[in-house]
Amino acid sequence: MAETMTLEIHRGDTAGGELVSYTVPSTPGMVVLDAVHFVQAHHAPDLAVRWNCKAGRCGSCGAEVNGKPRLMCMDRVDKYPAGEPITIRPMKTFPVIKDLVSDVSWNFEVNKKIPAFKPRNDRPPRFSQEEADRVQEFRKCIECFLCQNVCHVLRDHQRKEEFGGPRFFVRVAALEMHPLDDGNRTGLLKQDLGIGFCNITKCCTEVCPESIHITDNAIIPLKERVVDEFYDPIKKLFRILMPQSRPEAGD
Amino acid sequence: MPSYETHEYDVVVVGAGGAGLRAAIEASARGARTALICKSLLGKAHTVMAEGGIAAALANVDTRDQWQVHFRDTIKGGKFLNQWRMAQLHAQEAAERVLELEQWGAVFDRTKDGRILQRNFGGHTYPRLAHVGDRTGLEMIRTLQDRGVHQGIDVHMECTIRRILKDGDRVGGCFGYHRETGRFVVFRAKAVVLATGGIGRCWAISSNSWEYTGDGHAMALWAGAELIDMEFVQFHPTGMVWPLSVQGTLITEGVRGEGGVLVNREGRRFMFERIPELYRGEFAETEEEATRWVQAVIAGRRPDARRPPELLTRDVVARAIRREVREGRGSPHGGVLLDIASRRTPEEIKRKLPSMYQQFKELADVDITREPMEVGPTCHYMMGGVRVDPDTQESTVRGLFAAGEVAGGLHGANRLGGNSLSDLLVFGRRAGQFAAESAQRNASVAQVDPDQIDQVVRESLAPFERTDGENPYALHEELRSTMHNLVGIVRTEEELHAALGKLQQFRQRSARIKVGGNIQYNPGWHLALDLKNMLDVSEAVTRAALQRKESRGAHTRDDFADSDARWAKLNLIVRQGTDGIEVSPRPLPEMPPELKKLLEEGEHG
Ligand SMILES: Cc1cc2nc3c(=O)[nH]c(=O)nc-3n(C[C@H](O)[C@H](O)[C@H](O)COP(=O)(O)OP(=O)(O)OC[C@H]3O[C@@H](n4cnc5c(N)ncnc54)[C@H](O)[C@@H]3O)c2cc1C
Ligand code: SF4
Ligand code: SF4
Ligand code: FES
């Protein structure tokens, strides 16, 4: 007899839902997504779930497993206490569509507000690996939206009109600290993305599966830029004259 | 009849991977009203998973590189079956496309003098792959996505296209459904670009996601277009084999590009024994020579040794691994060992292969900086696809274009690593350009007669109407294992016939599939519909494989173990005939003398 485990999966849609129990055989190395797929193939063919890469690369399979935001494809079931059910719910911050699938379209709308990369014309596209490293950290983002899901400004206060969320601070940081970019997005950060609402709780950093230092390396330096720009004209002037000088990344 | 919504565009691009995004950017930049449609969310297409890099003769690391060498490598890797004109355009334009990506904000790894760094890969004479660690595809798709977002392209996410609609012999648009609501939708369009990717979900062990059900291949076939080279399915030599949960998940060739070696259970580097005639003299013959090459590469010197045989083309390496396993020299879980730990420092491994490190640590409890990985072949890439005009990417159906993995011809019998990402950019751009031009030539949007739509609507709803019947998941599993066992890396006449028999049975059973639940976001229903595509595509592969009575590139026949010079001049063309799928040989277009000369020079130098 194969060992089995119990999953409690959110079933339901906009009209409401409940946790439904399923029994699944456990196999070596199994991840939560495998267990969900087993349920789909054997018990509930219409169980809605998003996934693509099954290797932590595409950011499709975010959900709340035992209340913690996870990529289901990277979440080993043998990590959870044997004999206890594993509960799987969709990300809470976004409206549910069905079962484990939530409506994350708001994120794509926020993204549209961010002006594109603007290449500088005053230098050839040459830069060092060290310069690349700084932005490559941000460019690792797989858009799983787990950080958006845990940020209390969105999760508890639903400030989706005024606040862009950590994912988009990471994106702006990738542009602002890009060695070849010539744009200025501080106004956007302050007004449209409401970076002031962030009170540096670091919850976003804790859940990022790509280990991006969202708060220390993206948000704090960006906040400093906003402060310089709006409240400290001397520093702003300095930055314009010395475009290479950037606030040092912490952490 | 359920109602459906209707949209009208100049150009509709089906698929939002690298090829589709690049096509949509180009079409809209040229003034076409453009829609971009994808089954998943934007940015989740297969392209995001690409690891190792994008091939382009930038010559940043070895100044001897140039498009002519890239062209020669591509044709040689494709075992001379490639459409020469596609291989030429690809080699000539790839560098420009990569630099353009950098102008759009992509941040590749750098050389010491601050330019785009390039790494070695199988079958490429020089270090040629621009890369970002082992997440090159993410860099590429995000750059294109962010570029596209400000271009006024209408994106329809989580929308599955089921049929190309026609107006006489010309394209009239396409039909599909929104996954979220199940609502049907018609896109009327002057031109349609297929950029739907591959077909790997027809095989049991695969690096491909649920999206790769051959939709574009099947829809093109139904619309009357020709497919080419369908017998050539690439098995990547290094997929994970253990634990079962991750079986098939890809391990980038970059591991070998960075010095990783393949050994069998006896600890022997078996690739030294498997260098084929075609590559004789080009690879290291001793471990000492191979090690010297790796050390030179690491130090950034031009090597005075030949490259390790682990960097032979994928078809060769996959077959060699299969052989080790079959002859009892495999690893505990039926693969072989890939070892980078004894070749590079832990810091280097974590820096150049961070995703591989993480993937093994978290999913297999293996620390690749200390232990070898267990690897075996995994179904990875489809060389065959829609036959297109090499310059315009137009298929044999007017107004229907194809680019990226769904298009055939560039890679011939075997694709070189890194040549897909470059393919997406070069031919995605061309498809977008010529689709926009085609649309401009047609003043009005085509008419689509409602019967076509009625038919596909009825067909789509049928699985809901059955009260009992087959489970789509179970049937899919059977299809996958059949293709794996009977139409895998090595094929025989007998097994291919057996596969055709099975496919016939599956076809009958698929007509009895029932799905439960409602029409909203219902993966069981989606799979039931996708099975039709997979069955047709599987049959196309099997029939083409039966006809090619030789071994070449990714197509190996146990009963015809050698390459045959007569077959070197023939492509197989697949069409939908009145009695089903038909396959017929067609002579390759004649290569111009100056290009032939390039190939011959390669033989001697
Ligand atoms: C793990 C992995 C690693 C790889 N690494 C490399 C590498 O390092 N270098 C390299 O050159 N190549 C690599 N490849 C191959 C390469 O990534 C793919 O061949 C390439 O990305 C395919 O791009 P595409 O634009 O053709 O299709 P994709 O990126 O797969 O996009 C297909 C799109 O079509 C959509 N679609 C499909 N069917 C439908 C439908 N019916 N209706 C609507 N939309 C549809 C999908 O939703 C998706 O948006 C790798 C592949 C894998 C799987
Ligand atoms: S640090 Fe800021 S952005 Fe991150 S979770 Fe806390 S409040 Fe939200
Ligand atoms: S920053 Fe991290 S947590 Fe947030 S979306 Fe990107 S990868 Fe996910
Ligand atoms: S399926 Fe891609 S991150 Fe989980």
Image (cartoon, grey):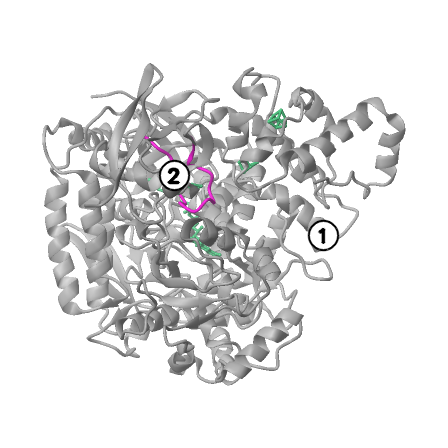
Which residues lie in the magenta part? A48-63
Residue A49, magenta (yes or no): yes
Q: Residue A130 got which mark?
A: 1
- Which quadrant of the frame does ligand 2 lie within? top right
Label 1 to label 2, Cα distance in Å? 34 Å
Secondary structure, magenta segment, majority class: loop
Residue B95's quadrant in the figure?
bottom right
* Residue that appears at 68% across and 35% down: A216
- At mark 1, the secondary structure is helix
Q: Residue A51 got which mark?
A: 2
* Residue that appears at 32% across and 18% down: A17
**To which chain does the residue with label 1 belong?**
A
Alpha-carbon neighbours of circle 1 within 10 Å: few (<14), some, or many (≥20)? Answer: few
Q: Residue A23 got which mark?
A: none
The image shows residue B480 at horizontal and vertical percentages of 23, 52
Marks 1 and 2 share the same chain: yes
